[in-house]
């Protein structure tokens, strides 16, 4: 933990609105809060829009650590730099940026290596404060500390983010598209492109056709996969999934007397080249591993399971079949070098971000966005801070 440095000279605290999680699982409370000036290596950002991710839902519901209240959730966003602290050189006031939950300091062994996207100087964790000092930049009007979420906390008109978690972007990129690359869509596309390093002609199985699973399909399509098999419990998702490149659909609730792995292995003559678990269930990770082709198959885990969830695999299955099981945080992407590539793909009309946004609401309707996602009625709902 680094010693906390003094705030930027001449920069004052800001009073603004935020949607605060006061009780687990209960509607967020829109209230006025105080956002402190940025310290050294920090940037204060005026949020233009933010999008809702399933991880926000997961931690909003948690009653025990790493769940905590009061907290400002949100981690997919687009904004404008309002002020910067000392030792910030990458961005300046007025720059358009996206905050990203995964740090990229550019100096540590991991950041300098092509083998990892996990910064070892500012490690990923479900923290309640800033990454360098652990303290909060938020208080309510009574002086109570409001906790951070994933180093971003975008459900506020202003937030403070470490420069290692900020990426400058072209202001010509639509805010309601750029924000998608803060987490979910980038994670899925990156998992196919970076983590799997997928070859053209590959066979892919995707477990769960929510926004992450569909982003994997989009990434697989871009990589030239020949077969993309979508697996879900809701058959009505198949028509939507076709738009993202899914070629075949399996309803995991209508398998008769066969297991899911028997069905997938039968369809693929021995298993898929790449299997992606996008739900967050240990039992589904096991199924994904069982659906991988022996010798070279990879099972890649993207879903966020409950804290403390344990995987169970038979030793013989690992030893004798030559498969790989691996995690993929943020799709294996290095935020500051890989996200510009995804943005270029979007402007070149290769990466189709538009189809992920199914709903847009104003900040005052943020709880409706929660309801839409919980009820499975949207992929990504963009929340505008000042919608006209």
Image (cartoon, grey):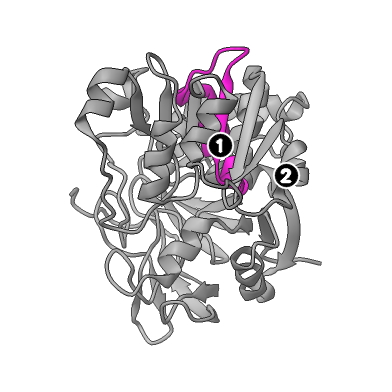
Residue at (54, 23) in percent of width and height: 193
Could you tell whether 331 is left or right of 306 in the image? right
Magenta-colored stretch includes residue 125:
no
Residue where numbered disc 1 is placed: 206
Q: Residues within 10 Å of mark 1 (few under 14, many from 20)?
A: many
> Which of pointers 1 and 2 lies earlier in the amino acid sequence?
1
Residue at (49, 31) in percent of width and height: 275
Residue 362, percent from left and from top: 72, 69
Which residue in the rendered view is the most extreme toward the bottom? 142
Q: Element at badge 2?
A: helix
Image-quadrant location for residue 353: top right
Q: Determine if residue 88 is in view.
A: no
Query: Which of these two is toward me, 117 or 225?
Result: 225
Q: CA distance from mark 1 to mark 2?
A: 12 Å
Query: Which of these two is toward me, 302 or 259?
Result: 259
Query: Which of these two is toward me, 35 or 302?
Result: 302
Image-quadrant location for residue 181: top right
């Amino acid at each position: 933990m680094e010693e906390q440095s003094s705030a930027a000279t001449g920069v004052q605290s800001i009073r603004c609105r935020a949607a605060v999680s006061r009780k687990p699982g209960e509607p967020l409370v829109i209230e006025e809060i105080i956002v402190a000036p940025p310290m050294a290596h920090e940037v204060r950002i005026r949020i233009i829009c933010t999008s809702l991710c399933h991880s926000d839902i997961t931690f909003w519901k948690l009653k025990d650590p790493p769940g905590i209240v009061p907290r400002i959730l949100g981690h997919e966003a687009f904004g404008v730099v309002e002020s910067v602290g000392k030792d910030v050189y990458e961005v300046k006031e007025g720059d358009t940026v996206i905050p990203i939950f995964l740090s990229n300091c550019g100096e540590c062994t991991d950041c300098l290596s092509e083998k990892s996207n996990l910064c070892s100087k500012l490690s990923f964790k479900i923290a309640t404060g800033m990454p360098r000092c652990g303290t909060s930049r938020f208080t309510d009007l009574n002086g109570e500390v409001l906790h951070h979420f994933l180093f971003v906390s975008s459900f506020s008109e202003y937030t403070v983010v470490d420069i290692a978690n900020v990426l400058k972007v072209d202001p010509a990129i639509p805010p309601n598209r750029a924000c998608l690359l803060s987490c979910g869509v980038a994670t899925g596309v990156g998992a196919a492109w970076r983590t799997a390093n997928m070859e053209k002609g590959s066979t892919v199985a995707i477990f769960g056709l929510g926004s992450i699973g569909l982003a994997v399909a989009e990434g697989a399509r871009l990589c030239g996969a020949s077969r993309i098999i979508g697996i879900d419990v809701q058959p009505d998702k198949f028509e939507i999934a076709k738009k993202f490149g899914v070629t075949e659909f399996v309803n995991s609730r209508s398998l008769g007397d066969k297991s899911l792995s028997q069905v997938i292995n039968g369809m693929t003559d021995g298993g898929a080249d790449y299997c992606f678990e996008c739900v967050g269930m240990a039992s589904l990770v096991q199924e994904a591993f069982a659906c991988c082709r022996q010798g070279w198959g990879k099972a890649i885990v993207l879903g966020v399971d409950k804290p403390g969830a344990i995987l169970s695999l038979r030793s013989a299955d690992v030893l004798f079949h030559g498969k790989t099981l691996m995690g993929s945080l943020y799709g294996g992407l290095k935020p500051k070098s890989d996200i510009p590539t995804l943005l270029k793909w979007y402007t070149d009309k290769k990466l189709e971000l538009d189809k992920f946004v199914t709903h847009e609401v104003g900040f005052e309707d943020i709880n409706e966005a929660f309801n839409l996602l919980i009820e499975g009625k949207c992929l990504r709902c963009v929340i505008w801070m000042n919608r006209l």
